Amino acid sequence: MYDIKQIREDFPILSRSVYGKPLVYLDNGATTQKPRSVVDAIAEEYYSVNANVHRGVHFLSQQATDLHEASRERVRAFINARSTSEIIFTRGTTESINLVASSFVESQMQAGDEVIISQMEHHSNIVSWQLQAMKKGIILKVIPINDAGELLLDEFEKLITPRTKIVSVMHVSNVLGTINPIKQIIRIAHSHNVPVLIDGAQSVPHQKIDVQELDADFFVFSAHKMYGPTGIGVLYGKEAWLDKLPPYQGGGEMIQNVSFEKTTFNVLPFKFEAGTPDYIGTTAFAKAIDYVEALGLENIAAYEHELLTYATQEMKSIKGMRIIGEAEQKSGVISFLVGDIHHFDMGTLLDRLGIAVRTGHHCAEPLMRRMGIEGTVRASFGLYNTKEEINVLIEGIKRVQTMF
Ligand code: PLP
């Protein structure tokens, strides 16, 4: 049962006020709030288990290692990966993409080879490739979008050439809310023997992901956007690919034997996990997975879709409202502009009413240029938002409008 009252009680921060107004938190695309079970897990592990993992013979170290590795198994099951060897813990989506970009370009690409991304990518899926491209003379190609904010699949296929070595696209746009047809993208890319990385930062919290069913070669996401702690993310990669890629960073954990003449590397997934991992974070991450799975991702998706439909309809009734991103398949994100009110002014004044939204380019400057704007106001929904909160947002926007 989707008991919204109970759900909201699980998130203590939601009952606080700002500027004397009840908090209306609509910045879930940036980060989500944490349920008590996640925060408690952090304190409990520090209080009663804390010890460095993997290397210790003592009791606490083994217990911490068991918790850490159980979390890896929890993540594996959550996205239905074949093996825990395919689950690399990173600091987040950004680090996961940088890891693949660095190791893939180094080992699989030559000058003149091509990477395909899309017009709507987050900077992390643009700049990570650019940094490598600059070093090696790699060409970046961009899938265009239509005015509604949907990828042009026909154009995508035309971009693929024998020099295309990888496609890297987002599943759900953090700005437009567009749910991209990644299954089709993967199928098209694979028909040309090109692997695909999916940036799942904005999809994993809102829909069930099965990496085997998708047949994604790499799939990346962050714990903090799905009610887990900051500083933890995942790189899922097919074992066959991860085996081919060289390590990203050097240090402890990722080696088998070290001498000054020659070093051999550890097996997967440890080959890509240099240094002490955030083992407290992974335990708390597993609790976040428990939380969303107990509610059911299908239920979360249905509930958030209802919020999106309601909010879209209400917002469209506001004079001068322009919604940026009207894809047919959309997640719970609404980017908007009202009349000629600057997005920053709108966001700042809504904040005074207790409403937390995000303003600006949302780390997607090329997308802003394509849409012919500098920035937007963005309301992004999470599993604990309500229609009443949307009403507060609508009233807030109208109130700001009267000030101009
Ligand atoms: N990709 C997308 C689509 C995002 O929305 C974000 C964050 O907003 C990122 C990547 C970067 O995620 P992180 O900052 O957790 O590494």
Image (spheres, rainbow, N blue to C red):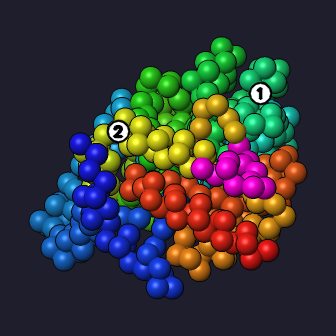
**Numbered marks: total:** 2
Q: Residue at x 43, y 34 (%)?
A: 209
Q: Residue at x 80, y 67 (%)?
A: 341
Secondary structure of residue under mark 1: loop
The picture quadrant where one finds residue 114 is top right
Where the C terminus falls, by quadrant? bottom right
The picture quadrant where one finds residue 297 is top left
* Residue bearing the label numbered 1: 152
At label 2, the amino acid type is Asn
Between 171 and 373, the one lying in front of the other is 373
Q: Residues within 10 Å of mark 1 (few under 14, many from 20)?
A: few
Looking at the image, the residue that sits furthest to the bottom is 19
Which region shows up in magenta?
314-325
* Residue bearing the label numbered 2: 299
Between 194 and 383, the one lying in front of the other is 383
Between 21 and 359, the one lying in front of the other is 21
Q: Residue at x 64, y 24 (%)?
A: 185
Earlier sequence position, callout 1 versus callout 2: 1
Between 338 and 122, the one lying in front of the other is 338
Q: Is residue 229 left or right of residue 331?
A: left
Q: Does the numbered disc 2 mark a residue whose Cβ is under 8 Å from ligand 1?
A: no
Residue 296 pos. (x, y %): 31, 40
Residue 112 pos. (x, y %): 86, 34
At label 1, the amino acid type is Leu
Q: Residue at x 61, y 27 (%)?
A: 181
Residue 251 pos. (x, y %): 47, 62
Answer whether residue 320 is visible to the viewer in this image.
yes
Mark 1 to mark 2: distance in Å? 30 Å
Residue 20 vertical position relative to residue 95 in the rendered view, above or below:
below
Q: Give yes or no for residue 242 being in the magenta stretch.
A: no
Q: Residues within 10 Å of mark 2 (few under 14, many from 20)?
A: some
